[in-house]
Amino acid sequence: QVQLVESGGGLVQPGGSLRLSCAASGSIFSSYAVYWYRQAPGKEREFVAFIFSDGRTIYVDSVKGRFTISRDNAKNTVYLQMTKLNTEDTAVYYCNAKPINSNGFYRRGESEYWGQGTQVTVSS
């Protein structure tokens, strides 16, 4: 069973930066798309960014130009570099690995994996 473990969250002032990491216990990232989601208090979980196995990325509009998702398949780790943070970025951040090929094909019958989440708090 593959496990995803997020780390790197914490308390940061507005305008600051954090880098989140999502480490997998197995070598799945070379064939999985990896997503970051976040959930703020009282709100639904929302998509933040994802990266295909070939490195292509997609971002939600609210983080474009501020967040960068990247991956190191050799380390089985995906990163979310967050800059210019503001209070609206406060949330629990989750990584999610989906069995999606670089052509967008979802491989049914394979598992998805979620991490436990890491808290990001932006406050002065």
Image (cartoon, rainbow, N blue to C red):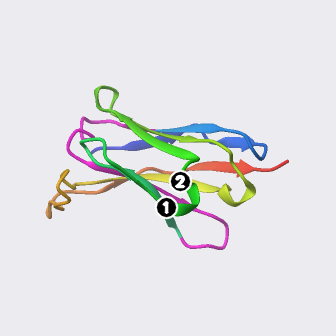
How many marks the image carries: the answer is: 2
- Asked whether the beta carbons under mark 1 and mark 2 sit within 8 Å of each other, the answer is yes
Residue marked by disc 2 = 64
Residue 62, percent across and down? 58, 61
Residue 32, percent across and down? 25, 48
Bounds of the magenta segment? 22-44
- Quadrant of the frame with the N terminus: top left
Q: Nearer the viewer, residue 60 or 18?
A: 60
Residue type marked 2: Lys
Q: Residue at x 63, y 42 (%)?
A: 83
Residue 20 covered by magenta stretch: no
Q: Quadrant of residue 73?
A: top left
Q: Nearer the viewer, residue 24 or 46?
A: 46
Q: Estimate the spatial distance between the alpha carbons at disc 1 and disc 2, rounded to whole Å.
A: 7 Å
Other residues around mark 1 within 10 Å, as few (<14) / some (14–19) / many (≥20):
few
Q: Residue at x 52, y 68 (%)?
A: 45
Other residues around mark 2 within 10 Å, as few (<14) / some (14–19) / many (≥20):
few
* Secondary structure type for disc 2: loop
Residue 30 covered by magenta stretch: yes
* Secondary structure type for disc 1: loop
Q: Nearer the viewer, residue 93 or 60?
A: 60
For the view shown, which residue lies furthest in the right direction? 124
Q: Is residue 124 left or right of residue 66?
A: right
Q: Is residue 94 left or right of residue 74?
A: right
Q: Nearer the viewer, residue 60 or 73?
A: 60
Residue marked by disc 1 = 60
